[in-house]
C-alpha cells in the first residue's frame, strides 16, 4: 500500500470537515498537493480559476452565499501574493475563508531562492486571526483544524503555509509525547444569549421612544421574523446596510432600503427625523448618515464584542446572537399606539419607489442604466442570488432592485474592490448550484477580471443543476464611478486618459465561448433581453449600452447642490452638458407629481 503523504492527509482532513470545493490555481509550490488531488479522485473538487485573486474571490462568494467555509489554494511566491486582495475582502466583510499556500522547500528558505517570500509576514495582517507555517507532518492536524475553527469562529480569513518538500513527506500523526499537540474534528457553536439586565434596559429605552428607526446588517439575516416583529411593535422603519440588503423584503412597506451614499431618501429621512435608534448586526461605517450626536437614544445588538459600541453613542450595547436577543426583547416591548411615525415612513417609501420608476424611465443615450435594474426587479426569481461589482452598478443595485422571497445578494462591502462580481457569481453557483445567479458589472470591472472568468464559467457551467448565470455588463466605455467621484469630490472634470475604456464586444466574446450573448442598444429591448436570459439553458452575458452621463445622485443631495457640482466642472469636461442634462432630468423626478399627489 502506498504511503500517505502530508498532502494526502491534508485533503482527507478537508473532506472530514465537509469541504467539497477548493478554489485554486496550480503551481510547482503545491505540486505535491496537486498529485494528492489526483490520488483522491479530485475530492474535494479542485476548481480552477484564471488567476489566484479570482480563486480567493470565488471562495468568498461561496462562503457568503452558501453559509459554509470557503477554501482557496495557491502556489508559493506570486501565487500566494495574488490571493491577498480576495482575502482582504473576506477580512473586511467578516467571511470565513481558509487559504492554503505552498512555500519553497525548507532547505532553500533563507537562501534568496526563486519565489521565496516571507509568507508568514506577508499574511500576518490579512490572516492575523491565524497564520502558521507547517514544518513537520505531526503539526498538520492541529494547524489545519485550528485554521478552520478560527475562520468560522472569527468570521475571518486564516492561512496555513506548507513548504513543497513537507507536502511530500510521509504523514505521521502526533504522538502521545511531550510537545506534541493532538487535535480533533468538529465544533459545537454556542448560542450567545444576552444579559437580562441589558435586555430590560434596552426595552425601557425603546418603549420610551416615539420615532424609532432600525438599522439592520448582515448579522441580522437569521433573525428576519424577529426583526419584523420588533418593527411592527415599535412602529419603526427599517433601513438596511448594503451587506444587509437581503435581510428583509423590499416589499414590506416600512423597509426604507439601503442607507448611505448609495442609499435611499427614505433611509436618509428616517435617520434625520428619528429619536431612537436600534442597530442589529451592522457596523455601517458612514456616521454622517446616522442621527446627529445627541439626537437619538440608541441600542446596538451584535454577536461580535469587538464591533459593539461603534459608530454612534449607544446607551445600551448588547453582545448576543441577533435572533436570541430579539426573542428575549420582544416580550418586554410595548406596542406603539400612535402610528403616525410609521405612516409617514410608509408614505415616504411609497413615494420613493414611484420616484425610482420615474427616474428609470428618463430618456438617455442610448439606455438609462437604471432601466436595466428596474426591468429586472419584477422578473427576479424568488430564489435568485444577485451580486454587483464595485462601481456605478453598486449604486443601482442598492437603490433600484426590490428584493423579495428568499433572494440573496451581496458585493464587496467594506473593501469595495473592483473585480469580484463575476467570481462571486461563480462561487455562488458552486455553493448553490440549484439557484439562478445574476451579476452586475461595469465594463471596467469586466475588463479587469470578468472577461477571463467567463472562461471559467465555460469550463464548469454544465455541472450546475440550474445553468442560469446572467452577467449584465453596464457598457459605457467609462470608469464611471471614479469619473463621478472626480466631479463630485474633487470638483474636477473627468481625466479622459484615465477614465476612457477601450470598446469591447462583450456579448460576442461570450458567444465565442459557447455561452449566450445578447447585445442591447435600445431601451425597449431591455425587458425582453432579461426574459431571454432568465429562460436560457446556459449562462448569458447581457451587453447593455448605457449612458455614462446618468448621475448616481446621493439621497441627501438637493437639486441646487447637484447643479453646483455640475457647474464646478463645467469648463474642461467634454461631457459636461450631457451629465447636466441627465442630472437635472433625473433629480426633477423627485419633485414631479406622483400617484399619491
Image: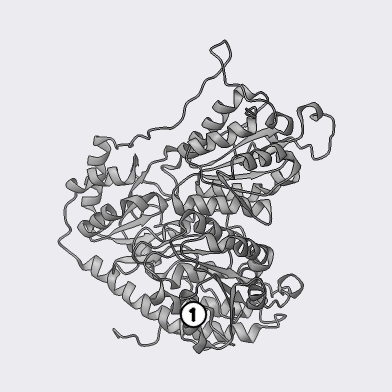
Q: Nearer the viewer, residue 31 or 257?
A: 31
Q: Position of residue 500 (x, y in %)?
A: 72, 75
Q: Residue furthest front?
A: 1
Task: Say if residue 284 shows up in the picture.
Answer: no
Judged left or right of residue 56, residue 530 is left
Q: Residue furthest top?
A: 178
Judged left or right of residue 430, residue 333 is left
Quarter of the image for the N terminus: give it. Answer: top right
Sort mark 1 into few (<14), some (14-19) or many (20+) by Cα contacts within 10 Å: some
Is 502 drawn above or below residue 28 in the view shown? below
Judged left or right of residue 181, residue 214 is left
Quarter of the image for the C terminus: give it. Answer: bottom left
Residue at the image point whose x is 23% and y is 61% from the top: 235
Is 527 drawn above or below residue 31 in the view shown? below
Indicate the quadrant where residue 119 lies: top right
Q: Residue furthest left?
A: 337
Q: Position of residue 304 (x, y in %)?
A: 42, 40
Q: Disc 1 on helix, strand or loop?
A: helix
Judged left or right of residue 216, residue 534 is right
Task: Say if residue 26 shows up in the picture.
Answer: yes
Q: Nearer the viewer, residue 148 or 210?
A: 148
Residue at the image point whose x is 29% and y is 66% from the top: 254
Q: Position of residue 553 (x, y in %)?
A: 51, 74
Is 484 drawn above or below residue 78 in the view shown? below
Residue at the image point whose x is 59% and y is 27% from the top: 140
Q: Nearer the viewer, residue 452 or 482?
A: 452
Q: Position of residue 464 (x, y in %)?
A: 50, 61
Indicate the quadrant where residue 101 lies: top right
Residue at the image point whose x is 34% and y is 78% from the top: 351
**In the rendered picture of this protein, how many numbered marks are placed on residues?**
1
Q: Nearer the viewer, residue 534 or 358?
A: 534
Q: Which residue is mark 1?
A: 532
Amino acid at each position: 500500500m502506498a504511503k500517505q503523504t502530508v498532502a494526502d492527509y491534508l485533503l482527507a482532513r478537508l473532506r472530514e470537515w465537509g469541504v467539497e470545493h477548493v478554489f485554486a490555481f496550480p503551481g510547482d509550490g503545491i505540486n505535491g498537493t496537486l498529485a494528492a488531488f489526483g490520488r483522491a479522485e479530485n475530492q474535494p473538487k479542485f476548481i480552477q480559476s484564471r488567476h489566484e485573486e479570482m480563486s480567493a474571490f470565488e471562495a468568498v462568494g461561496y462562503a457568503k452565499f452558501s453559509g459554509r467555509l470557503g477554501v482557496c489554494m495557491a502556489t508559493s511566491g506570486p501565487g500566494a501574493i495574488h490571493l491577498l486582495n480576495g482575502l482582504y475582502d473576506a477580512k473586511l466583510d467578516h467571511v470565513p475563508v481558509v487559504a492554503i499556500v505552498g512555500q519553497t522547500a525548507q532547505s532553500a528558505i533563507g537562501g534568496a531562492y526563486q519565489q521565496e517570500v516571507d509568507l508568514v509576514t506577508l499574511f500576518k495582517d490579512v490572516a492575523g486571526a491565524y497564520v502558521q507555517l507547517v514544518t513537520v507532518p505531526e503539526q498538520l492536524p492541529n494547524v489545519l483544524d485550528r485554521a478552520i475553527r478560527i475562520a468560522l469562529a472569527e468570521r475571518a480569513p486564516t492561512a496555513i503555509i506548507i513548504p513543497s518538500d513537507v507536502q511530500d513527506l510521509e504523514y505521521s500523526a502526533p504522538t502521545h509525547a511531550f510537545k506534541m499537540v493532538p487535535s480533533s474534528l468538529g465544533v459545537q457553536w454556542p448560542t450567545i444569549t444576552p444579559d437580562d439586565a441589558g435586555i430590560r434596559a434596552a426595552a425601557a429605552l425603546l418603549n420610551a421612544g416615539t420615532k424609532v428607526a432600525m438599522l439592520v446588517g448582515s448579522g441580522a439575516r437569521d433573525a428576519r421574523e424577529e426583526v419584523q416583529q420588533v418593527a411592527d411593535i415599535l412602529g419603526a422603519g427599517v433601513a438596511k446596510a448594503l451587506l444587509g440588503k437581503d435581510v428583509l423584503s423590499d416589499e414590506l412597506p416600512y423597509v426604507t432600503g439601503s442607507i448611505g451614499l448609495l442609499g435611499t431618501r427614505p433611509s436618509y429621512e428616517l435617520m434625520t427625523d428619528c429619536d431612537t435608534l436600534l442597530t442589529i448586526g451592522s457596523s455601517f461605517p458612514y456616521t454622517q448618515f446616522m442621527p446627529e450626536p445627541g439626537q437619538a437614544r440608541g441600542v446596538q445588538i451584535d454577536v461580535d464584542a469587538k464591533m459593539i459600541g461603534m459608530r454612534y453613542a449607544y446607551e445600551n450595547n448588547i453582545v448576543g446572537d441577533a435572533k436570541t436577543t430579539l426573542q428575549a426583547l420582544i416580550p418586554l416591548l410595548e406596542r406603539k399606539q400612535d402610528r403616525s411615525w410609521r405612516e409617514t415612513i410608509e408614505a415616504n417609501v411609497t413615494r420613493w419607489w414611484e420616484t425610482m420608476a420615474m427616474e428609470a424611465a428618463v430618456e438617455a443615450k442610448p439606455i438609462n442604466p437604471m432601466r436595466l435594474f428596474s426591468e429586472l426587479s419584477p422578473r427576479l426569481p424568488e430564489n435568485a442570488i444577485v451580486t454587483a461589482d464595485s462601481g456605478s452598478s453598486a449604486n443601482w443595485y442598492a437603490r433600484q432592485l426590490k428584493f423579495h422571497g428568499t433572494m440573496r445578494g451581496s458585493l464587496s462591502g467594506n473593501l469595495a474592490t473592483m473585480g469580484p462580481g463575476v467570481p462571486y457569481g461563480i462561487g455562488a453557483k458552486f455553493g448553490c448550484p440549484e439557484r439562478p445567479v445574476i451579476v452586475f458589472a461595469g465594463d471596467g470591472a469586466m475588463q479587469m477580471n470578468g472577461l477571463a472568468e467567463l472562461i471559467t464559467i465555460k469550463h464548469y457551467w454544465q455541472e450546475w443543476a440550474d445553468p442560469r448565470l446572467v452577467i449584465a455588463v453596464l457598457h459605457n466605455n467609462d470608469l464611471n464611478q471614479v469619473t463621478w467621484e472626480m466631479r463630485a469630490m474633487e470638483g474636477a472634470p473627468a481625466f479622459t486618459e484615465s477614465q476612457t475604456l477601450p470598446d469591447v464586444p462583450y456579448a460576442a466574446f461570450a458567444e465565442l465561448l459557447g455561452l449566450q450573448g445578447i447585445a442591447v442598444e435600445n431601451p425597449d429591448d431591455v425587458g425582453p433581453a432579461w426574459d431571454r436570459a432568465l429562460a436560457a439553458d446556459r449562462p448569458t452575458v447581457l451587453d447593455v449600452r448605457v449612458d455614462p452621463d446618468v448621475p448616481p445622485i446621493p439621497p441627501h443631495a438637493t437639486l441646487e447642490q447637484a447643479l453646483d457640482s455640475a457647474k464646478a466642472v463645467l469648463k474642461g469636461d467634454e461631457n459636461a452638458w450631457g451629465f447636466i442634462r441627465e442630472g437635472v432630468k433625473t433629480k426633477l423626478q423627485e419633485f414631479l407629481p406622483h400617484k399619491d399627489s
